[in-house]
Image (tube, rainbow, N blue to C red):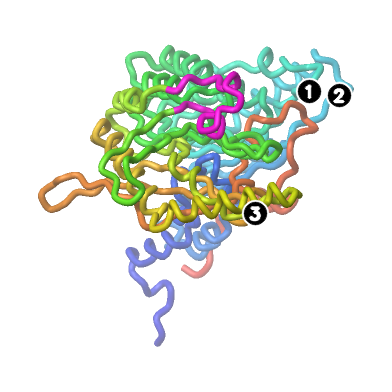
């Protein structure tokens, strides 16, 4: 007779259950740095687990629901989950995404909205606190956002942090909120209530120290004599941020940090790239070598957040608002990170000599014959001067040397990222090249720093991130998924049927 499912051993059935669980294929944490604008991978799709467990009494006894996901896209569904879900489903929930659009209460008075928000906040806390195995929470939209031009303070004066840890098992928390005011305030209501938080993604319209430091002070008052356990931080740099200051604040707040991802991707135009002015802004290393072919010496200039064209070609010196600092001073600030393994600070690595190279593209604007002839003569001279120069090899050599200096200061660092802007078909279409520099060890245990041969490239516009950028309810984007379909999945996942198949 052919082997049937129930002829298999308990160990094999447990192995099958492992692959039935969709959670095992999703990384932890599920979110990515702000420049990587992938849709959230968490979905309300637990039917395979529920159906497998309902096969028979034996499988039901062997397999406990675990790694369940929930995406909440309506307030009605959230309320149902407070009262109509079996304990086996509640206890098996590992990841939740909150994507409830704000209510438009334009006809209500401020006091009425305050009362409604307070009542909803109480229900919301009850909803989250019931999940005893919840490890990841991602917030895209909340019903508590009532910010508009005439009423900016509803959330901050209405919602308060509960007096207990309502997220006791949470390890990963992501805020991908578009509203600028909520991005500043909502994290204060969640982070202090998560004593085991390891991974955090957030954005603050002001400097990170102003928000994070105050939040962690609250956390420390609730959990005295404990060091915050955070291991990885995903943060989008504010356009006015100075990376040197941010690095100092973060280390003091999270001394156990192992992975740091700072993204300089601004509102709708990446932050590196402003489509209206065709300029690039980012923390930047300008690398100068003593030779274009086989350099023996490198010199590095460090700039916090600045338009590099204004540094190289200072037509408007008064616009330079950040004072350049010595590269070694920047490296010294990194040296305080004693546990850091991976670092991506959106550093734009610029070869100073690269800007003397001949242009790949002819000018797009109309020019007279004399201007055209001058342009061609200049480019021809540059081409002759740069014959035999392998600019990519030169760039990799410079990156390796800069990364080596950084890694010598941070002995635990295994990987750091540098970025370079590249024109594919002229200024109208630009991409960012992402270089990964890694540390390896030879047989004798000696450290070797090298650039990964594979270079990732992303269109500038794709890396644009809008978290914390909208001022009003009207500015909030529409959802990328169908609400009715998600609600149907959420409702179907409420049931863990007791009915059994063959014994």
Give 226 or 398, whichever is nearer the viewer: 398
Q: Is residue 173 left or right of residue 440?
A: right
Give 95 or 437, whichever is nearer the viewer: 437
- The residue positioned 76% from the left and 49% from the top of the image is 366
Q: Nearer the viewer, mark 2 or mark 3?
A: 3
Q: Position of residue 85 (x, y in %)?
A: 60, 43
- The residue positioned 46% from the left and 45% from the top of the image is 354
Residue 106, label in figure: 2
Quadrant, the N terminus: bottom left
* Residue 465 can be seen, yes or no: no
Q: Are marks 2 and 1 in contact (CB under 8 Å)?
A: yes
Q: Secondary structure at mark 2?
A: loop
Q: Secondary structure at mark 3?
A: loop
Q: Nearer the viewer, mark 2 or mark 1?
A: 1
Neighbourhood count class around disc 2 (C-alpha, 10 Å): few under 14, some 14–19, many 20 upward: few
Circle 3 residue: 362
Q: What stretch of residues is rendered in magenta?
A: 303-324
């Amino acid at each position: 007779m052919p082997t049937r499912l129930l002829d298999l051993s308990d160990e094999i059935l447990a192995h099958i259950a492992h692959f039935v669980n969709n959670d095992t294929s999703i990384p932890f944490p599920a979110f990515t740095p702000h420049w990587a604008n992938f849709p959230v991978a968490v979905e309300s799709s637990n039917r395979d687990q529920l159906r497998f467990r309902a096969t028979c009494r034996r499988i039901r006894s062997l397999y406990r629901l675990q790694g369940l996901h929930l995406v909440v896209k309506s307030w009605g569904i959230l309320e149902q989950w407070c009262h109509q879900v079996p304990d086996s489903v509640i206890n098996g929930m590992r990841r939740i995404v909150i994507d409830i659009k704000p209510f438009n209460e334009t006809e209500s008075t401020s006091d009425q909205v305050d009362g409604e928000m307070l009542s909803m906040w109480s229900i919301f806390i009850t909803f989250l606190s019931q999940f005893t195995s919840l490890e990841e929470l991602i917030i895209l939209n909340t019903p508590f956002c009532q910010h508009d031009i005439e009423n900016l303070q509803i959330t901050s004066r209405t919602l308060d942090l509960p007096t207990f840890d309502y997220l006791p098992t949470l390890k990963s928390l992501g805020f991908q909120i578009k509203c600028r005011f909520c991005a500043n305030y909502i994290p204060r209501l969640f982070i202090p209530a998560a004593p085991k938080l390891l991974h955090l993604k957030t954005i603050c319209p002001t400097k990170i120290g102003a928000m994070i430091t105050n939040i962690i002070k609250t956390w420390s008052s609730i959990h005295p004599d404990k060091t915050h356990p955070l291991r990885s931080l995903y943060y989008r740099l504010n356009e006015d941020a100075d990376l040197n200051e941010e690095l100092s604040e973060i280390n003091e707040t999270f001394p156990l940090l192992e992975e740091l991802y700072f993204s300089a991707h601004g509102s709708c135009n990446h932050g590196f790239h402003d489509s209206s002015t065709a300029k690039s802004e980012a923390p930047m290393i300008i690398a100068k070598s003593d030779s274009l072919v086989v350099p023996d010496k490198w010199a590095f200039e460090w700039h916090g957040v600045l338009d590099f064209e204004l540094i190289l070609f200072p037509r408007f010196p008064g616009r330079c608002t950040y004072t350049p600092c010595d590269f070694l001073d920047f490296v010294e600030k990194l040296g305080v990170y004693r546990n850091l393994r991976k670092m991506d600070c959106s550093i734009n690595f610029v070869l100073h000599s690269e800007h003397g190279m001949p242009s790949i593209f002819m000018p797009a604007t109309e020019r007279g014959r004399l201007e055209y002839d001058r342009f061609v003569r200049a480019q021809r001279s540059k081409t002759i001067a740069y014959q035999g120069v392998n600019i990519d090899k030169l760039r990799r050599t410079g990156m390796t040397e800069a990364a080596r200096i950084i890694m010598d200061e941070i002995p635990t660092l295994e990987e750091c990222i540098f970025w370079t802007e590249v024109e594919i078909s002229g200024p109208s279409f630009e991409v960012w090249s992402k270089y990964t520099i890694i540390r390896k060890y030879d047989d004798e245990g000696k450290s070797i720093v090298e650039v990964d041969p594979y270079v990732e490239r992303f269109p500038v516009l794709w890396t644009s991130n809008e978290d914390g950028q909208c001022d009003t309810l009207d500015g909030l984007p529409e959802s990328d998924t169908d609400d009715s379909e998600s609600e149907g999945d959420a409702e179907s996942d409420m049931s863990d049927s007791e009915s059994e198949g063959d014994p």
